[in-house]
Amino acid sequence: MTVQFAPPSQSAPAPAVIVNGLRRAYGDRTVIEGLDLRIERGEFVALLGESGCGKTTLLRALAGLDPVQGGRIIAPRRPAVVFQEHRLLPWDSLWRNVALGLDVPDARARVAAALAEVGLGDRLDDWPRNLSGGQAQRVALARALVQQPELLLLDEPFAALDALTRIRMHALVRELVANHRPGVLLVTHDVDEAITLADRILVMRDGRIAYEHRANDSGTIARGDLLAELGVLAAPAHG
Amino acid sequence: MSNLEQAAGTIDLPQTTSGAGSGTWRYRALSPLALQALSWLAPVLLIVIWEAAAQGGYLSPQVLPAPSKVIRTAVKLTTQGTLLNDLGVSLLRAAAGFAIGGAAGFALGILVGFSAVAEALIDRSIQMVRAIPFLAMLPLVIVWLGVGEAEKVFLVALGVTFPIYINTTLGIRQVDPKLIELGRVQDLSTLQLIRRIILPGALPSILTGVRYALATAWLALVVAETIGAQSGLGFLAMDAREFLRTDVIVLTIVIYALIGVGADLIARWLERRLLAWHPNYGAAR
Ligand SMILES: Nc1ncnc2c1ncn2[C@@H]1O[C@H](COP(=O)(O)OP(=O)(O)OP(=O)(O)O)[C@@H](O)[C@H]1O
Ligand SMILES: [Mg+2]
């Protein structure tokens, strides 16, 4: 289905991550069961689902942070992750923070470019504690993107930001993803955020991907359907 | 309202121009400088009274010599006696004991902090040994090592090991697990993880240990030197006791106090330098 939108010159899209029959349990409580997922490089996927349905659990499994109890994940060795909190090291300057784990000879130059991309190019030697919440989260984004990841995992990265800052961050993220073209999985509670940013929206329920929406030709996803599937509006009868 | 005017006149509002430490809203009728002077008034007064009592013959020099006499003794012992030498010997003992005990405590702390096996293996033993007040070990240490340099350095090291050990393990345990997880996400090697995340995260606690250890090191030295020393400040004091030279005894006490203050200053300076990033320690900026 995606193929028909792709320009002819582009060959079959390269997957950023493939998940088959994933099972993840905490003790004997199964949170994810038989989950399938595929995200292409350059594709922006948003994941919605009611609280506690296992979104973070899925993201952590994809990041290789937790063991899984069944199924298969084919992911890059090193996906980049941005968490809800910025997780900057308070004892390191911004450039050292962004360079964390970046083993290249011209690290500082690469970091400078990445910080410039998020609008903080003049703060290389500043300290995390001098940043606002939005700025800190931008540094976290720079830290994720400076690695040039094939897969970018975002777990509610804007949830703690005020509405205005969040809108600015949306624009920034869209631009960054357009430039770097990683596969993106964005976990969010914000239906509108998902609609604004994503090419595809997944709704998780009962440990699986229960619904899937693709942006139509005009790039929109029906908000009402989503809310119904999330159980917010009176739901249409489900099979 | 006159009430308001009065308030404005007596409450010192924080001003950026009035220097560091002015950011409190406490009631102050005096300027910071005046308060500073006031805080020195009592100790100075005490010394003046002491001096006057000694000069007036109300205080037997056998009991407590006049402060001026102590100062004269200090000058005399420095120029003609062995005061500097004894001071050096004492400082060297403290430094050696601190280095050995600090290294041992730090190494053990790192080991236990990082390895559950090491913790299971040695933590309980260390905690049990720690329950002994280390000064109570002195007779045993003397039996083992005799009364010499080794015994003194050992006692200092013993006193230093535990605070450093405990605060190192504590610090490592308190490192934010979210930051350790970040280290894994960023694909750090174990060594990088330790260097970039765990040690910096544990540093505030480790430095607290250092500060505490400086105090116990000093205490250990005083006790060790009081027993069978041939040189050092403690020897000076015990030797003076034989001849009822209270001026020398008081002098050594004052020197011990000064060195204690000095050690504390060093510890604070370390904290300010190494924890500049930390909101609770770093110099205000
Ligand atoms: N470490 C854990 N041990 C046991 N159970 C856990 C653990 N972490 C999460 N769970 C459980 O797994 C389920 C899914 O949790 P998860 O954090 O993935 O939810 P979520 O979809 O991210 O929720 P939210 O939208 O509120 O962030 C929840 O029922 C939670 O209680
Ligand atoms: Mg979550």
Image (cartoon, rainbow, N blue to C red):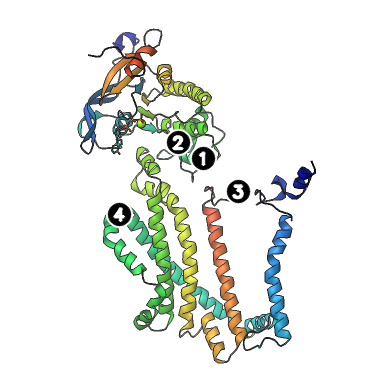
Query: What kind of element bears circle 4?
Result: loop
Q: Residue B235: give x, y in percent of width and height.
A: 52, 84
Residue on which the image places disc 4: B115
Same chain for mark 2 and mark 1? The answer is yes
Q: Is residue B4 above or below residue B138?
A: above
Measured Cα–Cα span from mark 4 to mark 3: 37 Å
Tag 1 and tag 4, C-beta contact below 8 Å? no
Measured Cα–Cα span from mark 3 to mark 2: 24 Å
Measured Cα–Cα span from mark 3 to mark 1: 15 Å
Query: What kind of element bears circle 3?
Result: loop
- Which residue is found at the position 72% from the left and 76% from the top? B48
Tell me the number on the disc at residue A86: 2
Amino acid type of the residue tagged 3 in the rendering: Ala
Amino acid type of the residue tagged 2 in the rendering: His
Residue on which the image places disc 3: B284
Quarter of the image holding residue A146? top left
- Which residue is found at the position 37% from the left and 24% from the top? A182
Measured Cα–Cα span from mark 2 to mark 1: 10 Å
**First in residue order: circle 2 vs circle 1:** 2
Tag 2 and tag 1, C-beta contact below 8 Å? yes
Ligand 2, seen in the image, is in the quarter at: top left
Chain of the residue that carries numbered disc 4 in the rendered image: B
Residue B276 horizontal side relative to residue B122, left or right: right
Front-most of residues A66 and A161: A161
Q: Residue A84: give x, y in percent of width and height.
A: 42, 33
Binning the other alpha carbons within 10 Å of mark 4 as few (below 14), some (14 to 19) or many (20 upward) gives few
Amino acid type of the residue tagged 4 in the rendering: Ser
Same chain for mark 4 and mark 3? The answer is yes
Q: How many marks?
A: 4
Residue on which the image places disc 1: A128
Measured Cα–Cα span from mark 4 to mark 2: 28 Å
Amino acid type of the residue tagged 1 in the rendering: Pro
